[in-house]
Amino acid sequence: MGMNLTLKVWRQNGPSDEGRMVTYKVEDVSPDMSFLEMLDVLNERLILEGDDPVAFDHDCREGICGMCGMVINGVAHGEQRATTTCQLHMRHFKDGDEVTIEPWRAAPFPVVKDLVVDRSSFDRIIQAGGFISVPAGSAPDAHSVPVKKEDADAAFDAATCIGCGACVAACPNGSASLFTAAKITHLGLLPQGQPERDSRAKAMVEQMDLEGFGGCTNTGECTAVCPKGIPLDTIARMNADYLKASK
Amino acid sequence: MSDQTHGYKVGEPIRDTKAPEGPIEDRWDKRRFSAKLVNPANKRKINVIVVGTGLAGGSAAATLGELGYKVKSFCYQDTPRRAHSIAAQGGINAAKNYRGDGDSVYRLFYDTVKGGDFRARESNVYRLAQVSVNIIDQAVAQGVPFAREYGGLLDTRSFGGAQVSRTFYARGQTGQQLLLGAYSALERQIAAGTVEMHTRHEMLDLVVSGGRARGVIVRDMVTGEIETHLADAVVLATGGYGNVFFLSTNAKGCNTTAIWRAHQRGAMFANPCYTQIHPTCIPVSGDYQSKLTLMSESLRNDGRVWVPLAKGDARKPAEIPEDERDYYLERIYPAFGNLVPRDIASRAAKNVCDEGRGVGPGGLGVYLDFADAIARLGRDAVEKKYGNLFEMYERITGENPYETPMRIYPAVHYTMGGLWVDYDLQSTIPGLFVVGEANFSDHGANRLGASALMQGLADGYFVLPTTVGDYLADVKSFGDVDPADVEQAREAVQQKIDKLLSVNGTRTADSYHRELGKVMWDYCGMERTEESLRKALERIPELREEFWNNVKVPGDPEGLNQALERAGRVADFFDLAELMCIDALHRTESCGGHFRAESQDADGEALRDDENFAYVAAWEWGPDGPTLHKEALEYEYVKMTQRSYK
């Protein structure tokens, strides 16, 4: 026997539309369904009833591409820790629950439609310096520069960021510090990343500000909702690198 | 010549693949030296379109931009970093021989040709093995955080189908880390102004003019606008077509539209029936299932696969005593045991389920049991190795694999078939290049684990940038694009969209897709027979007809309309599905991922028919059915043998 739920879903027909919450009932929801499969079932019904289905972003549905993301009952990606929306399953809800579903809300993430937002500001932060400049064909042998295992592991931990934007959605200031710091940390911990370390930190932080993201006040909401558990101390590292680069 | 009973014609064989002659180890050097170069000042005036931003497309666009071409890159996602290469877990092969365990370019070449069941081209595979070492160097220089040992050097592990340790990895997220490397290189070029990025754009047709690929028609998925982009060459890096089965491990958006449209415009489609079914995926849990999730092949290093000995045994796994269990892989394949290649492990799972011994809902599952590994190594050691995979399993199923065995079942994972390309990765349309999973080139009838990442990056970073330059050196002779050719392609796109929106029937595109997927899985899946394929070939046109008369697509052509996007993709899947079944029907042998029940040995193993089928089946599209062109496969270096893993 499945669950019956009441969904309150944010509907907004384009960036200039005001938007509003709309209530939908969904019935007979299986506990083994994923959250997005529950929305699929709702959308199939809406199409047949002649309504506009709810637009939402998603792709891999295995927690790694970073495309999905909704604020569920007030929490980015829902209340399950270290879980993307696509990996959230309905067994964590119970019959009769009311579930509110909203898009990421931040000025640099304008709503495209319903739950779909424009996160191209993240790409522009990477464009500012989130790379190591190395043309194809010019690389030395991979073993020419050993990397301490602990540095490699810490760089990997920061590099697991999926760019979903939950950190921004959760932050009361709408800051992109965790996202930006994750990349600065990943590349800054590796010997290959040293030549551009200063210019990278400076350019990425400046781009982050230019995009209209807020400042960090160490609230820690970002790391609490991060599906990959990017640690908060990456932000301290970013600040240190930025200060050093700005001297 | 024609074959009426199979519904296709036979055309001229393909005689020239443009691979250079001479010793195999010199061929790529020869090709590079013979390739014409483009003057740096001229590169700035040459436009190249790259569609898709996975490992192949992302690395290709970045490298072409770096070389100085004017590149336009397209992806359907909101950012190029989301392409499905990101989901690859296990690793990437490279013939570095850092372990000194006897690996070499030649051995990687040999393993790949054998693993592909002697249906891949020797020249291409050799080049892939050669280039593999450069990929690791490139990725490390970009800051890809591969796993390292305490001495600071790179760690490697073993993978199916190989006896050396040549798989480089970044925990269970190798694809993610390599893709983010390619993505960062691409973003660097976007910042430099050499690449113009178009996200949330979907390619809907190819512009062919004067016999050359000269551009694409795309839909801006946000505004709905149909746009024309012209260029001097077009590169398709749009991935595989496993979603024809509806349920697969592919991302939801993966589709065949770009390559199918190119096929209809003249690019031949090679070996469409070669699909890889991965043995270790989480089983289907209900009718609402939207996709399947893979559990890394590496789990088979320590997990033991079993089912109950008795049919219909409904006891909990813990209640089934050892002597009432059948560890069937260890029983049938004592030499390789749980580590047999993917195609063999998948079929064995299907067989025990068909016998009524499957476990879990619907009996479509087998156990992957870690109890022995936990007893031997301790829970902590198992958690260190597989912790993230166990968590993922628990998140999806709600079951704890430390306490109860995982349930797994095979699922569609990769398509070895794709657009036919020559040694230069150029399709049968001049100026249309195809890279990564979208082409057919290197894996034969079965891809080895950790070889998809290798091929995507080999194509994009190293092979294509050389060969596309050779083509573009003659750019002055291309002439202008005929506006009528553009108009005709735009018209076709517009008509299809209008038609889909106007049917206003009673079923959703997804429901048709699900039904088509079921037909393909039942009749053209892990095991194919003449009878099943004929059934599919009867059912697919009926279903397509019904789709075009009864689908309901809501909304307008303008603005974001995800239902319209899906409907367009499903429409193309119907046509592709038909070609896959025709190909599977004509190939009466079994090879790699293509198992024809009529062609097996006394032990039930796949039986190749080298005398009649040692060729690439390249299909030319035609309004009255396809035409088959055969490219004979010759093995000068690796002797053709029947694979055995017993």
Image (cartoon, rainbow, N blue to C red):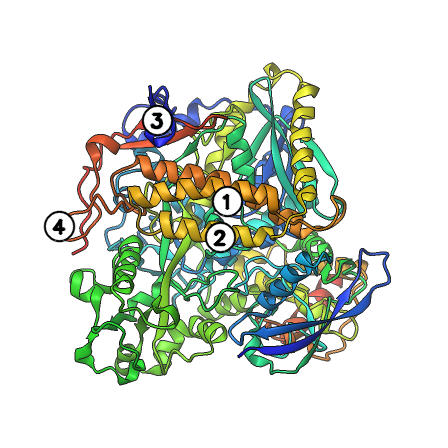
Residue B4 is marked as 3
- The secondary element bearing badge 1 is classed as helix
Q: Which residue is mark 1?
A: B543
> CA–CA distance between discs 1 and 2?
8 Å
> CA–CA distance between discs 4 and 2?
35 Å
Q: Which residue is mark 2?
A: B515
Instruction: State whether residue B491 is above or below residue B176.
Output: above
Circles 3 and 2, Cβ within 8 Å, touching? The answer is no
Residue B602 is marked as 4
Specify which label sits upstream in the sequence, 1 or 2: 2
> CA–CA distance between discs 3 and 2?
27 Å
Which quadrant is home to the C terminus of chain A?
bottom right
Chain assignment, label 3: B
Instruction: State whether residue B315 is above or below residue B352.
Output: below
Quadrant in the picture for residue B45: top right
Q: Residue placed at 79% from the left, 73% from the top?
A: A173
In this rendering, which labeled residue sits more in front, label 4 or label 2?
2
Circles 4 and 2, Cβ within 8 Å, touching? The answer is no
Residue B88: x %, y % from top left: 46, 57
Badge 4 amino acid: Ala
In this rendering, which labeled residue sits more in front, label 3 or label 4?
3
> CA–CA distance between discs 4 and 1?
37 Å
Specify which label sits upstream in the sequence, 1 or 3: 3
